[in-house]
Amino acid sequence: MTSVFQAHTDVAPLLSTTPTHADLAALYSATHWSLYDMPALLDSRVDIEWLAHMSHTRTIQRFGHTMQLFAPVYLSNLCYNQCTYCGFSMEHEYPRKTLSMAEFQLELGILHRHGFRHVLLLTGEAPGSVDADYIAEAIHVAKKTFDSVGVEVQPLSQPDYEMLIQAGADSLTLYQETYHKQTYLKHHLRGKKRRQDWRLTAVESGATAGFYRINLGALLGLYDWRYEALCLGYHLTQLQQRYQAVQFGVSFPRIQGMFGEYTVEYPVSDSDLVRLIATFRLVFPDISITLSTREPAQLRDDLIPLGITTMSAASKTNPGGYSGHDTETQFDISDERSVQCIDAVLRDNGYCPVYTDWS
C-alpha cells in the first residue's frame, strides 16, 4: 500500500510565503477557511486573539459546551525501537514491565471507580512480546466494563486491526512523530519504527479495517512546527477524502521530560500551540482535538475554550501506574490534578464533562 500522503510531502515552499495586508484582510472577513489558508493562519502576523475567538465560536457551534474525558492505560513499557526522544527506547537500562491480565483488571477497576467509561490502551512497540493477540485480549477484558476502548499501539497490518476491532476496539491513535523524512531517520535509529512508510500506511490499514474514529498528530519539538502542521493538514485532508465514513481527530503533543536526556531542537511556545489548535479548528471544524496531561494545569485550563473537545485526566504513563507499580514512564506528566479537580474546573467554566464516548 502507498500512503495517500506521499504526493504531498513538499510543503516547505508554502512556509516561505509572507501574507500581505490583502491576504490578512481576506482571512479576517472570511466565514470559511480551507487547507490553502493554513500557511497564512499559522503565520505570526495573524492576530492570535482573533484566532482564539473564532476557534472558540466554531467549537461551541459544533460541539456545544461538552468535554470528553478519557484515561490512558499503559500495558507495557517494553520496546524494540531506539528513538532519541522516548523514555521507552530500547537502549535505556531499567526493568521492563508488561501487565498480566489480572494486573490490567486492577488498573481498570480503579479507573472505573473514578467514573471513566472511555480508556485508551497504550504500549511500547514490542510486537514479538506485546503482540496483536495480547492487545486483543486486553481490549476484550476492558470492554466488559468500559463503553469505549481505543488503542495507541505499534502499527499493525489490516488483519491485525480487524482482530482488535472484533475484540471491541473502536478508535485508533497513531502519531507520525515527524513528517520530515530526514528528521524521522535522525530520531528513529533502530527497530521497525525506522520505516516511516510503514507508519504512514498503517493509518490507512486501520481505516480500511473498520476503525470509525482515528486520531493523528506529530510530536512537536522534533522539527519546525509549522511544517508539521501543514503536513498534518494535507494528510488529514487526503484521508478524509478517501475514508469519508471515518471520524478523524488530531492531537498536538509537545515533547516532555523522560528517562534519559533529550534537548528539544525546535521549541514550540504556548502561543504557537494556541495558533495550531485554532487553525485546525477553523480549517477542519468537525474534527475532535485532544489535549493530554503533557501540558501544565494552567495552560490546559486556558486552552479549554479555544477548540479542545477531548482531554485526558489524572493520567499515568507507566504500566501499573494507577495501582502503584513503580515502573518507568514514557514521559513526564505536567498536569497531575485528580479527576474530581478537573471535573470541577470544567463545570466552573460552563462545560459538561462526558466520561463515555458515544460518538
Image (cartoon, grey):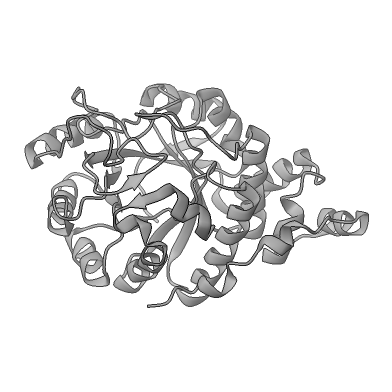
User: Among all residues in the image, which is located at the extreme right?
Assistant: 21
The reply to whether residue 61 is visible in this rendering is: no
Q: Is residue 337 above or below residue 158?
A: above
Q: Position of residue 341 (x, y in %)?
A: 42, 21
In percent of the image, x 60 and y 36: which residue is there? 267
In percent of the image, x 21 and y 66: which residue is there? 160
Q: Position of residue 39 (x, y in %)?
A: 73, 57
Q: Nearer the viewer, residue 257 or 138?
A: 257
Q: Position of residue 53 (x, y in %)?
A: 73, 42
In percent of the image, x 48 and y 76: which residue is there? 242
Q: Is residue 244 above or below residue 311?
A: below
Quadrant assignment, res 237: bottom right
Q: Is residue 249 left or right of residue 229?
A: left
Q: Is residue 27 left or right of residue 134?
A: right
Q: Is residue 46 left or right of residue 104?
A: right
In percent of the image, x 80 and y 46: which residue is there? 46
Image quadrant occupied by the N terminus: bottom left
Image quadrant occupied by the C terminus: bottom left
